[in-house]
Image: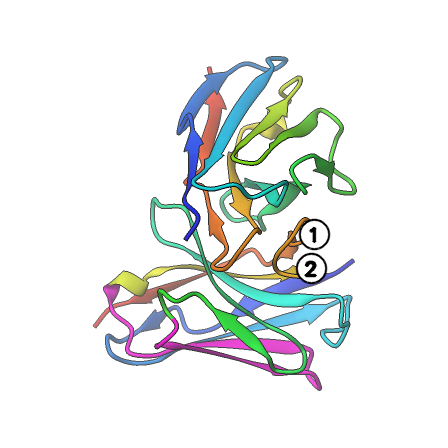
């Protein structure tokens, strides 16, 4: 299985901050990576797929980069609705696997 | 706009079968561009992919649960289902259904999810 290591596991930030979350894969997976936003009681939301492709309807302050084994999700100016948990997912091979998540809370 | 909604019993006895259904609205489950997934999240832990089913009935499961899981699709009702047999407390989790593109590759994203249903295994 491809292991996805995500860090940090949590971070504190303020509205307007730039936030960066990293996901590292245990093997090369090209650009086969997605990022999701998780809020309790709401459906998980796809933000980024193909490592850098912005899902339709997602604000442009979210961006993704990377390929191979190292990937990054950036929130360029954190908004109040962005306090949530973020996780990555590899779609390179079965079984599909997820990172453990990064919780972004208010400083 | 596609919507997915999970349904099923909130509590299941140990060694019994957990059965969940996902009802899809706003899109046809027979759309061959999409695959229909189950994912779970144990309390305080990350997401775990369980498997997917295609509208034809073909499926692929995570080896971690393969011997205990089965999925089915009912195109007449626009639903798909998950059966997990011989459950233990370790199967207590929030279960999500989701729609995805071709499961592996650049487009293998899960673009629509249900909000999840908590299944508790308890006597």
Q: Residue at x 66, y 17 (%)?
A: A77
The residue located at (39%, 67%) in the rendering is B63
Q: Are marks 2 and 1 in contact (CB under 8 Å)?
A: yes
> For residue B3, what is the image quadrant?
bottom right
Q: Position of residue A28 (x, y in %)?
A: 52, 41
The secondary structure type at the circle numbered 1 is loop
Question: Which residue is tagged 2?
Answer: B101
Relative to B93, does residue A107 appear above or below in the rendering?
A: above
Chain where mark 2 sits: B
Label 2 SS: loop
Drawn side of residue B46 relative to residue B21, left or right: left
| B2 with respect to A43 (left or right) | right
Does label 2 or label 1 sit earlier along the sequence? Answer: 2
Between B100 and B60, which is closer to the camera in this rendering? B60
Range drawn in magenta: B66-89
Determine which residue is flagged by label 1.
B107
């Amino acid at each position: 299985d491809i292991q996805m290591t995500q860090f940090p596991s949590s971070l504190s930030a303020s509205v307007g901050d730039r936030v960066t979350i990293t996901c590292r894969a245990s093997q090369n997976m090209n650009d086969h990576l997605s990022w999701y936003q998780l809020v309790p009681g709401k459906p998980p939301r796809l933000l980024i797929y193909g490592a850098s492709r912005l899902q339709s309807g997602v604000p442009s302050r979210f961006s993704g980069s990377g390929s191979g084994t190292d990937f990054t999700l950036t929130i360029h100016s954190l908004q109040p609705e962005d306090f949530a948990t973020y996780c990555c997912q590899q779609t390179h091979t079965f079984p599909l696997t997820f990172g453990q998540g990064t919780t972004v809370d208010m400083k | 706009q596609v919507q997915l909604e999970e349904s099923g019993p909130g509590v299941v006895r140990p060694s019994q079968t957990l059965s969940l259904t996902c009802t899809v609205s706003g899109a046809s489950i027979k759309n061959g561009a999409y695959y229909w997934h189950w994912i779970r999240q144990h309390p305080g832990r990350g997401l775990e992919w369980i498997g997917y089913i295609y509208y034809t009935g073909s499926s692929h499961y995570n080896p971690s649960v393969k011997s205990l899981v089965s999925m089915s699709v009912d195109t007449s009702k626009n639903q798909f289902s998950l059966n997990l047999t011989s459950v233990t407390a370790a199967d207590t989790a929030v279960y999500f259904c989701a729609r995805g593109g071709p499961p592996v590759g650049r487009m293998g994203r899960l673009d629509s999810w249900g909000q999840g249903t908590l299944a508790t295994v308890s006597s």
